[in-house]
Image: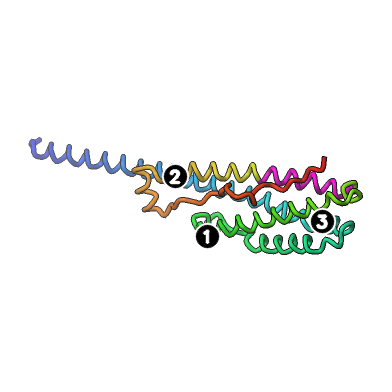
Amino acid sequence: MKSGMKIALVVIGIIVVVIVAGCQFYAGNYNKMVTLDEQVSNQWAQVQNVYQRRYDLIPNLVETVKGYASHESQVLTDVAEARSKAGGVMQLSAADLDDPEKLRQFQEAQNSLGGALQRLLSVTENYPELQANENFLALQDQLEGTENRITVERGRFNDSVTEYNTFIRQFPRNIIANMSGFRTKEKFTADSAAQSAPVVSFD
């Protein structure tokens, strides 16, 4: 075999190896990005589930409080309005998580609802009969558990977003991410007092 032919075969072999290695690298990193993206979506669904549970608890809570404190109309109205606003952004999809404005609106609505609930529960301290009501106590326990779950699920969501964002921003994976349409996602922020869970203990 002529030396020129040997060199050509070697070069072709090297090119094939490089192409195969490049395809494997691309495929491996692309698949990992898909996995991490799905983890973020799954965790977002958990966040929405716990917020939905809180949303669903509110009508019964309001009706129970109204039976003992009907003249606290402003507080009750505030809760109803905040719930309505939160309901309007409840179905934010995981695909929208790369839009800071949409997540900000979602978070503001949930924070507003949390603040309204906190004011409502503060008012109930003035009504001993309400605090002794079995239905109210059960709702209080459910709400407290839900608020705790919200904190937990938000933390898990932020962790999954951090892992995803870190992976797609590292070189050279950021090239693959940009080529394939993977974008960094937004996280919940925790620098506002409005994000504190409502205090629901009356001990």
Q: Which residue is mark 2?
A: 31
Q: Earlier in the sequence, mark 1 or mark 2?
A: 2
The magenta segment is 133-150
CA separation, marks 1 and 2? Answer: 28 Å
Against 81, residue 135 (above or below) is above
Q: Main secondary structure of the magenta part?
A: helix
Q: Could you say where residue 80 lies in the image, as x and y percent from the top left?
A: 75, 62
Q: Could you say where residue 65 lies in the image, as x and y percent from the top left?
A: 85, 56
Mark 1 or 2: in front is 1
Numbered tag placed on residue 55 in the rendering: none
Q: Looking at the rendering, in which quadrant would you find the C terminus?
A: top right
Q: Which residue is mark 3?
A: 60
Against 32, residue 67 (above or below) is below
Q: Secondary structure at mark 1?
A: helix
Mark 2 or 3: in front is 3
Q: Secondary structure at mark 2?
A: helix
Tag count in the figure? Answer: 3
Q: Residues within 10 Å of mark 3 (few under 14, many from 20)?
A: few
Q: Is residue 147 magenta?
A: yes
> Which residue is drawn at the image coordinates 12% and 38% (left, top)?
7
Q: Is residue 102 magenta?
A: no
The type of residue carrying mark 2 is Asn
Q: Earlier in the sequence, mark 3 or mark 1?
A: 3
The type of residue carrying mark 1 is Glu
Q: Looking at the rendering, in which quadrant would you find the N terminus?
A: top left
* Left or right side of 172 for 47: right
Q: Are marks 1 and 2 in contact (CB under 8 Å)?
A: no
